[in-house]
Amino acid sequence: MTLSVRARITHSNFIFDVDVDWPAEGVTVLFGRSGSGKTTLLRLIAGLERPSGARVSFRNEIWLNGRCWVPLHRRRIAMVFQEASLLPHLSVRENLLYGYKRTPIAERKLHLDEVVRMLAIENLIERNVNQLSGGERQRVALGRALLTSPRLLLMDEPLSALDTQTKRDILPYFERLVMEADVPIVYVTHAPAEVERLADRVVFLRDGHIDRVETLKHALSRSDSPLFNDEGVVSVIEGQLGLKKEHGLTPFHVGEDCFWLSNPIYSDSVGRSQRLRILAKDVGIVLTKPENTSLLNILPVTIQCIEHAREGHVLLGLRLSGGQNLFAEITAWSCSRLQLLNGVNVYAMIKTVALAE
Amino acid sequence: MEYLRQSLSAEDWTAIWLTLRLCLYTTLILMVIATPVAWWLASGRSASRTAVQAVVALPLVLPPTVLGFYLLITLGPRGFIGGTLEDMGFHHLAFTFEGILIGSVLYSMPFAVQPLQEAFANLGRRPIEVAASLGAGLIDRFISVILPMTKGGFIVAMTLTFAHTMGEFGVILMVGGNIPGVTHVLSTTIYGYTEGMQYAAAGRLSLMLLIFAFIVLFVVYWFNRGFEMVKP
């Protein structure tokens, strides 16, 4: 049950040459810089590119192989594009129903009411498309895609045209979709934060070639991962959100450990599985648990490995009591001063903890 | 209006109906031909597209008599098309309504193709890709997305084609001669009146055409605000 693509496209100064497959389930992120071929790969899967000699197959079906070709409208794929791609001559409701009406009745798994509720677009439905903000448009585009009950959902940088705040508002909807819609997703992005929040596996592309395909956990466990190019090494920790306490902080449970979050949390995400995102340079090490400190998040950890990082620094691989990994970047001098070694139990002090977004 | 009805002769009315018929058929035929041609022209750049675009635009620069001359040669009894038709037992097409219809279609081609090409180019690929991803097939996409989104282009193309066919003179005179009820359209009727010194009759028809042309152009520019187009 895989999605597999084999193609070679040569433009004047760009060679795209891939031969790749991955399981057709969960969220697969195509990650790379602009010009690395992410969008080309996505368009190949969609059938919007049809180079000679290419082969594309999905599960047991061959979508492209020589003369054999299934056009996009027969593949039952839905797409969400980078820029708002709502049909301007139709209302929001007509846009939402455009694909639904063209889906065979027996194949309709999602219906208007559910999707509208899921994306919180009840009050937009009677509006005109050009009265919507950028974030609202993307939510409607996502709803429209879902209403075709697709077998595969392709998203081409759906958040990149939105500002940071809108992105933050809309991501929970994407996350919820990933969990509830149960459709394999291929998601193109160059933003590591989106990868960390949504991905199950990552396809790394560079200069038109596939670098490697690995699970998110794998991708995040090596310190040289391309995901860390922008902000340095990041740890992603999975856990459950608790209820906000009267002192204004929200607990985040990871096994027996508990992190405290101070930034606003969406009430409907309580109890759900979530991901925390912690920068390695925001993590410090202390040998004994300090009692009088303003820092909230101090957790017992075991040192797993010590690697050289950028000049004068080392990267510590730490293990939380529940078994998840946490990275800390400290100076080499501190490391030798504290005599840190593999297997030593210490405490990690974390300055900033935020939900992945 | 009442004045016009009383003052127009039976011959004038025949010419008016013939002209309207010619304009209507030309417009319908051109919409069918020009839509795929314009789509193909708008869908990329290549040497073959440039060549076709130049051929389509030829009637804009050639004297109508040149086009008419070639058509007369081709459609006439000894021409390639006319001759073939004669061999098959049909009549050749010179000095017939079908003949001037073919001439009109060719002569008005740029006025149908260019606004459509512009509209399709402005539309871009994305709405069509979106519609395809939502399960719409080729014809479905054309009816539910392309047509409504390029409505303005179609209105402009149809009005310009209709109006330009009405203003045709040289091609018709060359291909059709001046046979009442067959090829005797308004423009050639006016020419006939003027030659016969019937200035009052020529003036009435001319005024009619003038007013009609103004209305058509007004409508076109009204629908066409903020939209690059061919200058008739």
Image (cartoon, coloured by chain):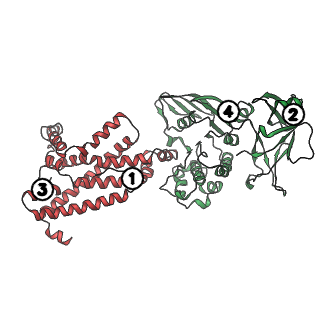
Chain colours: A green, B red
Say which of B28 and A123 sits in front: A123
Q: Within the image, what quadrant is residue B148 found in? A: bottom left
- Quickly name the residue at label 1: B227
CA gap, disc 3 to disc 4?
79 Å
CA gap, disc 2 to disc 4?
26 Å
CA gap, disc 1 to disc 4?
46 Å
- Quickly name the residue at label 3: B191
Mark 2 or 4, which is nearer the eye?
Answer: 4
Please determine whether, in this image, residue A109 is positioned above or below residue A68. below
Q: Chain of mark 3?
A: B
Please determine whether, in this image, residue A284 is positioned above or below residue A124. above
Measuring from the top left, give residue B127's x and y in whole percent: 48, 47
Q: Chain of mark 2?
A: A
Relative placement, left or right, of A254 versus B145 is right
Dots 1 and 4 on the same chain: no
Say which of A346 and B1 sits in front: A346
Type of amino acid under label 2: Thr
Type of amino acid under label 4: Pro
Mark 3: few/some/many CA within 10 Å (<14, 14-19, 20+): some
Residue B185 visible in the snapshot: no
Query: Is disc 3 placed on a helix, strand or loop?
Result: helix
Name the residue at 79% across, 40% down.
Answer: A282
CA gap, disc 2 to disc 3?
102 Å
Please say if the residues under marks 1 and 3 sit with CB atoms less than 8 Å apart.
Answer: no
| Number of numbered discs on residues | 4
Mark positioned earlier in the residue sequence (2 or 4): 4
Measuring from the top left, give residue B38's x and y in whole percent: 35, 44
Dots 2 and 4 on the same chain: yes
Measuring from the top left, give residue A275's x and y in whole percent: 75, 44
Type of amino acid under label 3: Tyr
